[in-house]
Image: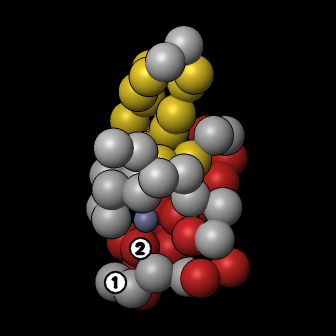
Amino acid sequence: MTKELTKNNNKYYICEECGFAYKDNQTAAKCENWCREKHSCNTEITKDAVKLD
Ligand SMILES: [Zn+2]
């Protein structure tokens, strides 16, 4: 399950495996499935990650 986070009135979805944030739940879920199976990050997915600080 991805984690939801609201910041500056924007909603983000966090991959619980690697902690990357995404603007859409679908990409976050894809990342999470990948991370869980492969124990590594897929740059095709993480390129869509949003940097939060
Ligand atoms: Zn991930």
Q: Is residue 20 left or right of residue 10?
A: left
Identity of the amino acid at label 2?
A: Cys
Q: Position of residue 7 (x, y in %)?
A: 44, 22
SS label for mark 1: loop
Q: Are marks 2 and 1 in contact (CB under 8 Å)?
A: yes
Whether ligand 1 has any atom under 8 Å from the Cβ at mark 1 is answered as no
**42 to the left or right of 4:** right
Q: Nearer the viewer, residue 40 or 21?
A: 21
Residue at the (67%, 47%) spot, across then down: 26
Quarter of the rendering containing residue 46: bottom right
- Mark 1: amino acid: His
Q: Single out the residue that lies furthest toward the top.
A: 9
Q: Residue at x 54, y 13 (%)?
A: 9
Q: Quadrant of the C terminus?
A: top left
Residue of label 1 = 39
Relative horizontal placement of residue 37, taking residue 46 as reference (left or right):
left
Does 39 sit above or below residue 5? below
Give the answer, above or below, for where 42 lies relative to 9: below
Which quarter holds ligand 1?
bottom left
Mark 2 = which residue? 35
- Disc 2 CB within 8 Å of nearest ligand 1 atom: yes
Q: Residue at x 42, y 57 (%)?
A: 20
Dot 1, crowdedness within 10 Å: few (<14), some or many (≥20)?
few
* Dot 2: element: helix
